[in-house]
Image (cartoon, grey):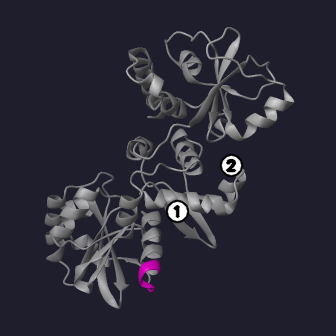
Amino acid sequence: MTNLIERLKVYVNEVLGEITEVHQWPEASNMPFFLQELYEFYHIRILNRPCLLMVSLNSNDESPAIVKKHWNAVAKKYAGDIIYIVETITSFNRKRLIEQNVPLIVAGNQLYLPTMGLDLREYFKSAKESALKPLSSVSQILLLRYILGYYKNSLPGKELAENLGYSRMTLTRAIKELEEKGLANSIIKGREKHLLFPLEATKLWSAAQAYLQNPVKNTIWITQPDSTFPALISGESALANLTMIAEPHNSILALFVNEWNGLKKLLKLNECDKGEPHCTKLELWRYNPHLLTEDHIIDPLSLWLSLKLASESINDERIDQALEELMEKFWSHKL
């Protein structure tokens, strides 16, 4: 809850230019017991007006009718402005709460304070504009690394840049992109911007589906490389290693597209016709697959995306069944 309050302070300060300290409300113990179980209450001044923050402890998106009922119950105990605070919210529930005149703040996304004449919806505007635009490669790496368990807490942009080999400016753009799509938040600690994912892994994976892209940019066929070739097992070859599906006739490997031309000259590799014996199918990836695994096989999430979004895999029941098995195994180990 501390992180949510910190993000709230940063957000209100950014959009309104002023904020006083946030303190726990001493009279919260006088609230009905069911409200104390569902919310924490904080006192704050916004535009020099005393306000009570009604901070939801429910990780699920509560129905607007229930929130309105709780807000009315709190209003019987507090005469000033009462603001509903929630970490994430669907566009449908946001619209319903606004229709019911419930003041609310979603840090980084929404500020609706009708008694003060404030209705800021920057995120929803930008989200609509970018709804059809997939995540950039760097943003997708950050999101997948979080789901895969590479980090659990907020991480500074500088550390992320060093770990991934990207510039801080590139990481800053990626974090902003994730924020605009409602998939992540950033908080300021000292002078450093930290990346924070508010959703748990399963919910984040579901929320991100509309923005994730196939990591495979292009596919070529090459003469079978030796063991020095720094590619990872991919495609149906990887799926055969991780599920009960049979191995494909030709092996499949994944390589970061930026590395291909240099390695082709260095290792004197030749391209060949599709499906020829002793040839390998090489997927040229938009991002470096090594950033998402420490194994010799690509990570299961990128594997799922590469096959689920590939046109040649559509309506292939074998692959669909194997992908279901793959994800069941992955999530069973995560839970």
Q: Residue at x 79, y 23 (%)?
A: 269
Question: Residue beneath label 1, please?
Answer: 176
Mark 2 to mark 1: distance in Å?
17 Å
Q: Nearer the viewer, residue 278 or 75?
A: 278
Q: Quadrant of the N terminus?
A: bottom left
Q: How many marks?
A: 2
Q: Nearer the viewer, residue 261 or 331?
A: 261
Residues at badges 2 and 1 in contact (C-beta under 8 Å)? no
Residue kind at label 2, given as amino acid type: Leu
Q: Position of residue 35 (x, y in %)?
A: 22, 63
Residue 151: which disc?
none
Q: Residues within 10 Å of mark 2 (few under 14, many from 20)?
A: some
Determine the main secondary structure of the stretch shown in magenta. helix
Determine whether the residue tagged by mark 2 lies in a helix, strand or loop: helix
Residue 90, picture quadrant:
bottom left
Question: Residue beneath label 2, please?
Answer: 164
Q: Residue furthest front?
A: 273
Relative placement, left or right, of 2 versus 171 is: left
Determine whether the residue tagged by mark 1 lies in a helix, strand or loop: helix
Residues in magenta, as a range: 14-18
Q: Position of residue 291 (x, y in %)?
A: 66, 40
Q: Position of residue 169 (x, y in %)?
A: 65, 63
Q: Can residue 106 be found in the magenta stretch?
A: no
Residue kind at label 1, given as amino acid type: Lys
Q: Residue at x 42, y 26 (%)?
A: 328
Residue 69, picture quadrant:
bottom left
